[in-house]
Image: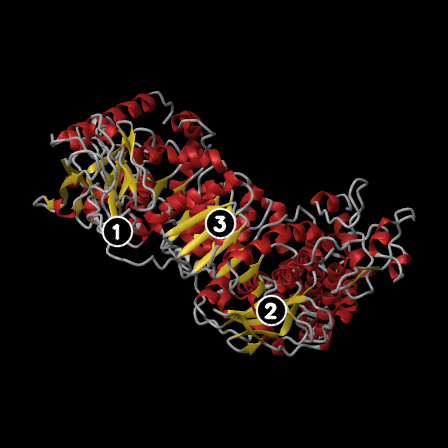
Amino acid sequence: MAQGEEERGDLCSSQAPPSGPESHVIYAAAAAAAATAAHRDTCLDFLDCTATTVGSVVDAALKEAHLRYPHQSAMLITWWYLYLAARSVAEQTLRMASVLQKLITPLFTGTPEPPRNKVTVVGVGQVGMACAVSILLRELADELALVDVLEDKLKGEMMDLQHGSLFLKTPKIVADKDYSITANSRIVVVTAGVRQQEGESRLNLVQRNVNIYKRIVPQIVRYSPDCTIIVVSNPVDILTYVTWKLSGLPKHRVIGSGTNLDSARFRFLMADKLGIHSSSFNGWILGEHGDTSVPVWSGTNVAGVNLQTLNPNIGTDFDEENWKETHKMVVDSAYEVIKLKGYTNWAIGLSVADLTESLIRNMNRIHPVSTMVQGMYGISDEVYLSLPCVLNSGGVASVVNMTLTDEEVAQLQASANALWDIQRDLRDI
Amino acid sequence: MGGERENPLVIDEALFLCHSSISKHGLREEEVAATSDCVGTHSRDYTGSKLETKTRQTTVDSEKLFGVKLKYLPRSVAHPAANVTLHTPDGRNIIIIIIIISAHATAPKRGYALYVHIEMSTQEKLISHVMKEEPVGCRNKVTVVGVGMVGMASAVSVLLKDLCDELALVDVMEDKLKGEAMDLQHGALFLKTHKIVADKDYSVTANSKVVVVTAGARQQEGESRLNLVQRNVNIFKFIIPNIVKYSPNCILLVVSNPVDILTYVAWKLSGFPRHRVIGSGTNLDSARFRHLMGEKFHLHPASCHGWIIGEHGDSSVAVWSGVNIAGVSLQNLNPKMGADGDSENWKDVHKKVVDGAYEVIKLKGYTSWAIGMSVADLVESIMKNLHKVHPVSTLVQGMHGVKDEVFLSIPCVLGNSGLTDVIHMTLKPEEETQLVKSAETLWGVQKELTLLFILLKEPIAMPPVIRSPSLDMFDANKTSIEKSNNRSRPRKPSTVVIHNSMSTSMGSSCFHKQAEPGTSAGEATYHPGNFRTQR
């Protein structure tokens, strides 16, 4: 009651035309007052209200109200005015904007269509932003959502990307700490988590990243129950398993970025030795994304010419040309880049964009990604390892049965056992 | 040796000697010395013996090779007719029979037969090189100088837009540089740029079409772009001549801040004609403006047109008369646009553009993605010869009432020759005044720079900068060395004249170099540290 009187007192005493952010309220109050006055057959036409008359209008209207409805109903009147003010603010805004909205006549004023190719990137560190930028520059998404816990960094990254929206074909870029903005995503790329320090193995990061995932994954699935999740954080095979368990999604919709990057590195290094482009060299690295990945030498070929036929010792220790060294370089390359610049991001970002392209464009392309291999190659545990998978908009459509040597199968099984040993001990998933 | 001497082991340029097969295939080895031309592309260390290739001639260490002690015979030995080569049926292996006849004067003639079974490597079995000439090399090379956040964002944007066939990265931090190059190379499968090179040495940048210079200090939180001037000028004094040395026909695209001043500096230092030195300018500001405009109208920024020109920074000019959507001038619909009484507060939109960079820096520490994409947009227009109009920084002396030699952003046509034309905008008097004012501010800062790059082309013996600014500067009778030695007078800021054939008058400076006690007169020692202490 007392507050209402104070407000009225303030309004009544203002003589100068109001300006600044409160002016809307004043205008609205004036409009409201004038509306009420007009309703009572006074001569004010509220459409022609200008700033200079507002003060007097408010004065007049409120004085009139005070005269008519003294003491206890004054509060009621204030509330009534506030309601009218709210309504008038809306009208007023539209009226002011319509000067330029004269430009555009809407034909369809229903709710806008939901996005069809929305991609969410969880984690805006170096890897997350590299994935985001690669996806944007490849024009794969019609909406991009970014999520992280660091609010300032998140907002800064979103603004930086938005400032470049002239050059992009992704019209909507949003970011928030709250997962509700990720709703209706088709693909969710999870890069959140701690990263390897120099010399640190990927497996060391397990429990720390599992704890982070326990917070992230249920939220993702809550808002995008039909999405496909691409897990990037290391150790990727274990975390893909964790994500699968935490999300409850069917296994073909949880993919680990796996050895897609290792294979890309392998193809680059081999092709570089031969003097050709990476895409003209075909070679697959499967299994664990890490120190025990398996290069399938029997599949390496250029233009269909199988390299193992040319050099039967390829990849073995007896090979004079030491092609095995190339695989070692692939395994070491991540550590080397981390040693030089502190982290790796561009290659993994491009690799994730490549996977996203197959998924969004329903391409049925084959990529070596981390998928559930229980039941294949004699593996009985629920582990995720990388095998050549056919990716389309449903996720992993099928898995290619590569012809592996006994040694390669043994390596896969060893990896599976090592992973299961660690997974067994994880709690609460 | 003798021209008629046959080269026993040259079959084909792609061969090389595989040591193991000699013992493996149990060939007959006889006492022989051989000097052979073995054109190999690799030298391999196998079982301890090394085959060295020096140009096209190789001396085979026969003892190690055959495990047999052999007498060395003089070289005029190989009998042409005795050299026979046979291919195995699958065409992949070669057997060579060499019969070498000693021509030693006193020794009896002896023949030696050497069977060498040469196994080609996997590569040679797979691929035969058929081109006789030198490879053409790169045609569309882009160099990025500086691998910080902006440099890498520019590099990645250029790569993802498939604009070049070779990318070179240069920086002073070697580890970071190598790491970034490796990281990009690992993504080569997903890119269409075959060659990504990086080195501290500028020779890797040779024959570039476009060189993007992002090197330099960046704004800290709250710091204005103009503060960075002197630090970045010093860095440019090292960079630009190196670039020009290796790519004398390139187009320089300057991104480091303050971009307008540094474009001027790059122009002066490089000696390039003005159409080949471009500053990224307000291309980004205009992009930000169009983004904000797009948000206001729920349209894509590409359909909202608005130009921000002038200084890339706090005093940029929004040309309200040009703001339009589908050709409909918005100022016609809202005559107060951009003025103070504007109910829609378009002035705030421009303010947000100016503040945009500061805000992003406050939130994440730097800006990278937007400027990277803006650079790629400009590089695209240049590489693809699009003749597209962009608001970029160019020499505006003589336009819009600007009298000083400054670079400001105006709409320019970009193509593969560079910045070939400028668009003459119809500006209101107040907009022109703003441009002139920006020009004056920039000229004020430019004047104070120790423009020693003029002297880079002069012998260093000339005393370059002021030791003691004093009135004897104007005394023609004193030699310059005397003048600069006169340090007894207290220093006070005053007009300074450089005595050389291209003397330029310099404004009073707080940037002039303080004399170090030990340095000899006339020595130009420009350490960045000197300038930093001035602040």
Residue annotated with mark 3: B169
Disc 1/disc 2 C-alpha distance (Å): 56 Å
Q: Chain of mark 3?
A: B
Tag 1: residue type? Gly
Residue under pointer 2: B274
Q: Which type of secondary structure does the marked residue at label 2 adopt?
A: helix
Kind of element beneath mark 3: strand
The subunit letter for the residue under badge 1 reads B
Name the mark on residue B3: 1
Give the crowd class for mark 3: few <14, some 14-19, many >=20 residues within 10 Å. Answer: many
Residue at 45% from the left image edge and 51% from the top image edge = A133
Earlier residue among tags 2 and 3? 3
Q: Is residue B435 above or below residue A262?
A: below
Q: Nearer the viewer, mark 1 or mark 3?
A: 1
* SS at circle 1: loop
- Under mark 2, the amino acid is Arg
Q: Residue at x 38, y 24 (%)?
A: A428
The residue lying toward the viewer, choosing from B123 and A17, is: B123
